[in-house]
């Protein structure tokens, strides 16, 4: 994901701005071990990358369970 977004940013006009909507885990900046999207973007763009997390009071969403070897398991309603 990070490589794709970085490519698009590099191709855009210098004053272009981007907004991405991803799960909180993906936009977070603290997962150096897995180098997720947010971590990679913070590494490349420094403080020019802002991450916002949203939390909702009610409702559900689907997520996948992580299995060993970073494989994705079945969907789980949360």
Image (cartoon, helix red, strand yellow):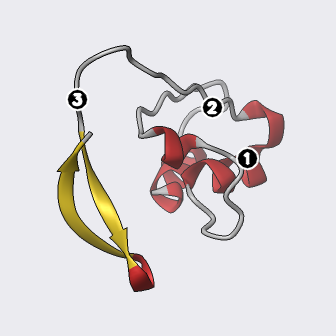
- Observer-side mark, 1 or 3, equals 3
Q: Quadrant of the C terminus?
A: top left
Q: What is the C-alpha distance between the residues marked 1 and 3?
A: 29 Å
The answer to which of 35 and 70 lies nearer the viewer is 70
**Tags 1 and 3 touching, CB below 8 Å:** no
- Whole-percent x and y of residue 39? 67, 53
Q: Which of the numbered marks, if any, corresponds to residue 60?
A: 3
Dot 2 surroundings within 10 Å: few (below 14), some, or many (20 or more)? some
The answer to which of 67 and 41 lies nearer the viewer is 67
Report the label total.
3
Dot 3 surroundings within 10 Å: few (below 14), some, or many (20 or more)? few
Q: Residue at x 57, y 59 (%)?
A: 36
Q: Secondary structure at mark 1?
A: helix
Q: Residue at x 49, y 27 (%)?
A: 19
Q: Quadrant of the N terminus?
A: bottom left
Q: What is the C-alpha distance between the residues marked 3 and 2?
A: 22 Å
Q: Secondary structure at mark 2?
A: loop
The mark nearer the N terminus, 2 or 1, is: 1
The mark nearer the N terminus, 3 or 2, is: 2
- Observer-side mark, 3 or 2, equals 3
- Whole-percent x and y of residue 37? 55, 53
Residue lying at the far bottom in this picture: please name it.
Answer: 69
Query: Horizontal placement of 68 versus 13: left or right?
Result: left
Q: Residue at x 29, y 16 (%)?
A: 58
**Tags 2 and 1 touching, CB below 8 Å:** yes
Q: Secondary structure at mark 3?
A: loop
Residue indicated by mark 1: 42
Dot 1 surroundings within 10 Å: few (below 14), some, or many (20 or more)? some
Residue indicated by mark 2: 51
Q: Residue at x 42, y 77 (%)?
A: 70
Query: Horizontal placement of 16 versus 33: left or right?
Result: left
């Amino acid at each position: 994901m990070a490589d794709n977004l970085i490519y698009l940013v590099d191709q855009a006009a210098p004053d272009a701005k981007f907004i991405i909507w991803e799960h909180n885990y993906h936009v977070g900046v603290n997962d150096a071990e897995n180098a997720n999207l947010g971590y990679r973007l913070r590494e490349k763009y420094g403080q020019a990358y802002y991450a916002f997390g949203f939390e909702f009071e009610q409702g559900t969403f689907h997520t996948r369970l992580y299995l060993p070897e970073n494989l994705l398991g079945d969907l789980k309603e949360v």
